[in-house]
Amino acid sequence: MQLPGHRKRSVAFWIVLGVCLVALALTLNITWVVANWRTGVMVLVGAVSFALLIAGLVLNTIFLVREIRRNEQHDAFINAVTHELKTPVASIRLYLETLQARKLDDERRQEFYETMLQDAARLQGTIEQVLTAGAAGARRKRRRAPVDMPVLVRDCIAAAGRRHHLPDGALSYRCALAEGEPAIVVGDAEELRAAVMNLLDNSIRYSGKQVKVRIRVAKVGAERIAVRVQDEGIGIARAEFKQIFKRFYRIPGTLRVKGAGLGLFIVRSVAKRHGGQAYGESEGSDRGSTFTLELPLAPST
């Protein structure tokens, strides 16, 4: 994410201050040791004391910089969520006031109802994502049950197509399993659905105007199953893959895309809670991305 000017200056100030303090401590340490090298015990005590001082200064600087960046991420999250909540509420209110103030024909009224339902769905989606992210970060007892992953993925694809009003062919699905071969994961169906939906939503949002997303379900070895979601969108720089699964993180230059920076955090959290993993791949900017959710299969009986 990009820091505003005053935030960047604040981060730079603390980094420079920390470096200067460490340099000063080292200078004093070396000078003191040279001046008192004959007093062995005092030299040892002084060296240890200065080493501890330096370590404390370094840790303090790191902590301050992290706190500044974390606060900036929280601010960006609050702004994004506020926008995602305020916009559909304002839209719904406007349409309701119009319906109340004017007499409209049935066709126009149905159009308004459809728009309000879409805004309500967007509002509900934002709330559910925030709640899911909170649950993903907390320890709680999961509802464990057998989940047929190919069926769940197909349901998510259909839901994503309706939500984003995509034409036929925008989302293509392939199941690389033998006919009748079971692909059961034991876990929380709602959490798994949230993870797959977030992968699909991200690929669609970052695809630009031409959405072309390929979804593939396949086994990884004999004991794991993978859901791969591949798009032809804006792509991701290699250096960003260390950050994109963190809570609230958004890639610099993508802030115009709607979102709160929680989707991939939810995906990885759900994967870990189910004994699996989530990771991404990209060949670079404007070359698309592939994200994989990998989970352990239920033992065959």
Image: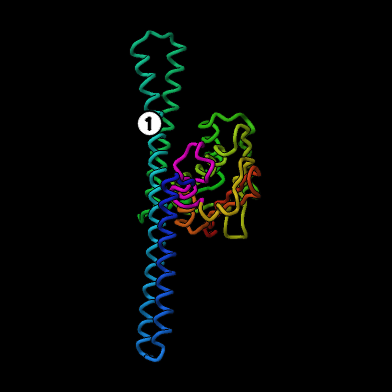
Nearer the observer, 229 or 3: 3
Which quadrant would residue 15 be assigned to in this image? bottom left
Across and down, in percent, residue 244 comes to 51, 50
Identified at 50% across, 39% down, the residue is 255
Range of residues picked out in magenta: 244-265
Where is residue 150? Give x, y as percent.
57, 45
Q: Nearer the viewer, residue 135 or 18?
A: 18
What SS does tag 1 mark? helix
Residue 49 falls left or right of residue 208: left
Q: Is residue 270 visible?
A: no
Residue sitting at 37 percent across and 14 percent down?
A: 99
Looking at the picture, which amino acid does disc 1 mark?
A: Lys
Q: Residue at 54% of width from left, 48% of height from top?
A: 149
Q: Is residue 283 above or below residue 157?
A: below
Residue at image mark 1: 86
Answer whether residue 264 is magenta in the image. Answer: yes
Residue 206 x/y as whole percent: 57, 39
Considering the whole magenta stretch, tell me its main secondary structure: loop
Residue in the foreground of this view, choosing between 1 and 202: 1
